[in-house]
Every structure is written in structure tokens, then in C-alpha cells.
Image: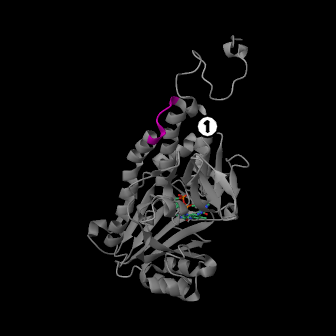
Amino acid sequence: MGHHEHDHHPPMPPGTLVAGHLPAIPALVRRRPRIAVVGGSLTGPVLALLLIQAGFDQVAVYEANPDLPTATGGVLSLEHTALDVLDRLDIAQHEYVKDGFETITQIRGYGPHDQRHRRRTYPGRFTTWTLLHHALAARLPTGVVQHGRRIADMTAERGRPMLHFTDGGREPADLVAYCDGRTSVGRRLLDPARRLHYAGYIAHRGTASTRPDDLDDFQRWEPCPGVQFNLAPVPGGADWIFFLNATAQQYTDWFGAPPRQRVYATTAQVSPAARDHVDAQAAAHLPAHLADLVHATSGRAALPVLDIAPPTRMAWPVGDGHACLLGDALAPPRAHTARGAVNGIEQADGLVTALRQHTRHGADLTGALLGWRRRHLLTAVAAVRQGPTIGARLGLGTRIDRP
Ligand SMILES: Cc1cc2nc3c(=O)[nH]c(=O)nc-3n(C[C@H](O)[C@H](O)[C@H](O)COP(=O)(O)OP(=O)(O)OC[C@H]3O[C@@H](n4cnc5c(N)ncnc54)[C@H](O)[C@@H]3O)c2cc1C
């Protein structure tokens, strides 16, 4: 047994400096900051797990949806950077990647002949929201996530950010990390000029309980301009997304509220008229076996495709503390970019790197957050810009109707 010098010292309050024993850094940074993570879907839990792994012991996740543990979602792509973060969290890949394909097959009905049928390698793997969310949630220590707690506002009190909940509760924090998705309250509070705009088309979604025999990777059907149909195997069947142009008025008629108000239409909100329209488009544009698959799918949903101005910042001072935006809260990219989950996970990883330098080595926190922005902002901007470019190439998004 070695000799433990510090055993001879009397107990000290945390943060006390002892010459010769601790590195000469300000006492303040030795206090572990209190970190509030807003949103418990994907970006939030990844951030919380990385923080806990890095030794941050005052982490709370506030999730608005009381039923999120029973929620389900469809196919998601994860590039190698994101997969590597999950590796580092010791989450076995087979837990969330059930079909190990690495390719995307594109079947196009127009354009140059050599580009009509192509199989490309995707630099990553495919999971589903359900699989990934459960793999993450299962690893969060009990008590870290508080479900059914919706943030309504944030103020600065006694120099620190103070979160206000719709249930009347209040919680202070040193750092607030908003991972609260497309309709982020954090973005509304911190960056109010950046609002969502309807892009002029809809992602109609379905989870089929059967799988076409030939479906062994991610299929992307583009029969004519203005129509894209994505199909991927998922546990128990196949997941499809059918992108079709529609005016904001059509969206409202079909799903009961305007696009910016109803950013996700559940199965119950999909009207018979919406279902008929999708079935008719499938019959008109897709091979018979896929039109039949669409027709037979009872589990439907829809999302209006929404754009947002590119972000210019990722972190803001709040009193002497900070608040930042990550994932879809920072900038929700269009689904075609396949960057949504990847951006959030990369940003969470980068944020923990910055915070570790701050607490371990006394790095200036504002500077560390600027470095974080420098490494991740351009990627977020690129994804947001890429969406309309891809949409235009596909004939999706009319841009004439954007209330
Ligand atoms: C149930 C569910 C299913 C999904 N399915 C798919 C899918 O099939 N395919 C796909 O591409 N993407 C899906 N997504 C979206 C996908 O997770 C994101 O596009 C992306 O991965 C980035 O995730 P995120 O964690 O940053 O944001 P999100 O996944 O949007 O998560 C934001 C979270 O914040 C919570 N929240 C929002 N406002 C507040 C508030 N004021 N206070 C507290 N909490 C708040 C929300 O309830 C949500 O859980 C799904 C999201 C959810 C929640």
C-alpha cells in the first residue's frame, strides 16, 4: 500500500487550494457546474451520458413529454462519428443497429441513364429512433431524467440561469443545454429572429408491418420530379417516408392545423383525405408492390418540411452562466441531408470536450464555448443550406406558399 499524504490533512471545503497538492487554478473552476439538459429524446440523453462519464455529477434532464419512454419513431441514419460516440458510451452497436447494411439504393425515373439505378455506400449505419432512444435511456441513472417537465421560460437570477417550468417549478443551473428539438423553447428565447418556415412539401410517414422480399438496404425511389419515396427495413417490418409537394392550406386541411403549428401529425391526426391522397400518389408513381405496401400501412404520420435560417451562434451568456442550443434545437436540417441525429450527437460530444477542458484545466469557459462553436457551427449551417438544394434538385418545395 502506498502512503497517502493527503490522509493527514483535515477535511477542507471543496475548492480550497493547498500549495503543492493541487494545480494552481482558480478555486471556482473546481466546483462542478450544475448542468440542465432540456429535452430527453436523442441529443439530450447523449449529452447527459457523456457528461456523467466525464465526472459531472450535477446533471438533470428535463423532458416535456410524460410518455416519451413509450414513444416510437422510424429510421435514422448515424455516420461513423456518431457511432463512435456511442461506442465510447459502451453501447454495443447491435443493440441499436438491427440490419447491418451500409448502402443506399437509388432508383430514379429521370435524368442521365447512368444515374437511374445506383447503389452508394453510406458512411455509417441505420437505426431507429425507438432503438436508439431506449439504448440511451436505459443507461441514464435513475432520477437524472424528469419526465413531464416542460420549460416555459428562462431568466437570470443571482447571476445564474433560472429555468421556469409550466408546472410552476423553478430550477437554477450554471449551464443550460437546450436539446429540445425543432420547436425549441431555447431557440425562441435565445435566438428569436430565427423562425421556422414551411418549405412547401410534406414528409408522409408510415411503419409497415411487412417487409418487401427484396428490401435489404435503404431504398430511395425518385420516379419523377416532385416525388421521393424512401424505404428501409426496421424490426418488425419496413419504414417509409413519402415526400410530396403540398400547399400550407392542403396541409391544414389534411392534418387539422397549419404546418408551423402542427409540426408533427400523429396517426390520429391523419385524415382520411390525407390517407387517400398518399395512397393515390403511391398508385400513380410507385411499383405495384410498394403502392400495395403503402395502402396496407395503418400506422401513418406526417411532418411538414420546415426550413430555418442558418445559425450564427450556439452559446449565449445568461448572468454569469451560459445557455446553448444543440441538435434540432440549434438547426433542424431537412430529412434528405440525413444529418439530424448526427449533428446533435457530434455537438454533444464537442460540448463535453469544452467543459472538460474548463473543469479539469481551468480553461476559460467562454473561450471554450467559442471553440466549440468554431468546430460545429459550419457543419450545422451546411446541413441547413443543403436541404433546399437537395429539395430543388428533386422538384420538392414550391416556395410559393410560406405563411
Ligand atoms: C418520439 C420521437 C420520434 C422521432 N422519430 C424520428 C424518425 O423516425 N426519424 C427521424 O429522422 N427523426 C425522428 N425524430 C426526430 C429526431 O430525434 C431529431 O430530428 C434528431 O435526431 C435530433 O434529435 P434531438 O434530440 O435534437 O431533438 P428531438 O428528437 O426533436 O427531441 C426534442 C425533445 O425535447 C422535448 N421538448 C421539447 N420542448 C421542450 C420543453 N419546452 N421542455 C422540455 N422538453 C422539451 C421533446 O419532447 C423531445 O423529446 C423523432 C423524435 C421524437 C421525439
82 or 40: nearer the viewer: 40
Give the class, few, some or many, for how many residues have Cα within 10 Å of label 1's Cα (few <14, many ≥20): some
Q: Is residue 223 magenta?
A: no
**Would residue 144 appear left or right of 384 to someone viewing this image?**
right
Q: Position of residue 185 (x, y in %)?
A: 54, 63
At a point 53% along the width and 85% down the height, the residue shown is: 254
Screen quadrant of the N terminus: top right
Nearer-the-camera pick, 38 or 340: 38
Q: In the picture shown, does residue 195 fall above or below 244?
A: above
**Quadrant of res 30:** top right
Which one is nearer the viewer's eye here, 73 or 332? 332
Amino acid type of the residue tagged 1 in the rendering = Arg
Q: Which residues are magenta?
A: 361-366
Q: Residue at x 58, y 45 (%)?
A: 174
**Residue placed most toward the observer, 338 or 51:** 51
The answer to which quarter of the image holds residue 146 is: bottom right
Residue 196 % position (x, y): 44, 70
Q: Is the C terminus in the top left, top right, bottom left or bottom right quadrant? A: bottom left
Q: Secondary structure at mark 1?
A: loop
Image colouring: one colour
In reply to whether residue 364 is colored magenta, the answer given is: yes
Locate residue 380, reporting x and y percent.
40, 55
Q: In the rendered image, which residue does mark 1 sit on?
A: 32
Q: How many marks?
A: 1
Give the side of residue 39 with respect to residue 2, left or right.
Answer: left
Which residue is pictured at 61% across the width and 34% down the height?
31
